Amino acid sequence: MIDSRERLGGLPRRFTKMAGAGNDFLVFPGPVSVGVRETDTIRRLCRRGAGVGADGVLVVHRDDGSGHVVVDYYNADGGAARFCANGTRCTARFAKLTGLAGDEQTVDTGWGALGATVRPDGSVTLQLPEPVAIGGHVATFDGGSNLLEAEGTSCEVGVPHLIVFTAEGVAVETLDLVALGPPLRRHPALADGANVTFVSAREGSRISARSYERGVEAETLSCGSGVVAAAIVAGARLGIEPPVSVTTRSGTTLVVDFRLEGCVARDVTLTGDARVVFEGVLHEEAV
């Protein structure tokens, strides 16, 4: 029997694999001090084929003083990030299932404190810090293939995003993100680069989105904060009325509600699934 406190490569050996809208995570009980050794362990464990495989790692614990749930998020490359919306939904569900919190929670992230409601069907609604600011327009480039609109829009949702709409008549499902994602992810107009979400408008209050994420350096099946940014920018630029239903590459639909006031959005919520995939114990050979 593996003791729940036993560690391997600096991380607890017991973990839970979770997924939110196709974004998958390794969830470890915390707190954990993450240094060079732990960063290397995260990289190894997230590597698909050679490790467990995940888009990132969530380290979750309860702050006994405030009663808040606390999550530290690390991308698949081992680097810390301020916020991951899909990961925060998974955090809230994990906290509910493990007795760290009830249905109504406050989750402390690197971006700030978020309200979270865990519903009986396992879905979670997040109340995001406000305001969410819509940034400026920047020129896009797609090698002359005319697949994208000429300008994208920056939007900060805990972490930086670049929202790029497809050209008229081009479906986001047809894009080659291996070619289009990397240069935009490192856009020279954005100081530290950004996650890039490509968007096509559908009928009514619906859009489809695909995201190329920094720190993963690949397309993920979903990016929750990118979905939020995409919905808000779609509301501002295209007049799409909230709540906005956003279909991701996983086929899962997330719902974003908000209230626009000029170039900022208030009362922003994100609702979607947060599923347990399996529970596991790391073997010595994993690292």
Image (cartoon, rainbow, N blue to C red):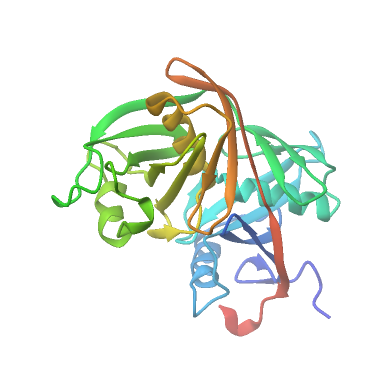
Q: Residue at x 72, y 48 (%)?
A: 123
Residue 7, horizontal then vertical, whole percent: 69, 70
Residue 116, horizontal then vertical, whole percent: 72, 38
Q: Residue furthest top?
A: 262
User: In this view of the protein, can residue 15 be seen by the observer?
Assistant: no
User: In this view of the protein, can residue 228 be seen by the observer?
Assistant: yes
Q: Residue furthest left?
A: 144
Q: Please tell me which residue lies in front, 137 or 129.
A: 137
* Rendered view: 227 above or below 19: above
Residue 233, horizontal then vertical, whole percent: 42, 30
Left or right: 236 in relation to 273? left
* Rendered view: 278 above or below 218: below
Viewport quadrant of the N terminus: bottom right
Q: Quadrant of residue 57?
A: bottom right
Q: Residue at x 25, y 33 (%)?
A: 138
Q: Residue at x 45, y 61 (%)?
A: 77
Q: Quadrant of residue 259?
A: top right
Q: Please tell me which residue lies in front, 232 or 166.
A: 166
Q: Please tell me which residue lies in front, 141 or 58.
A: 141
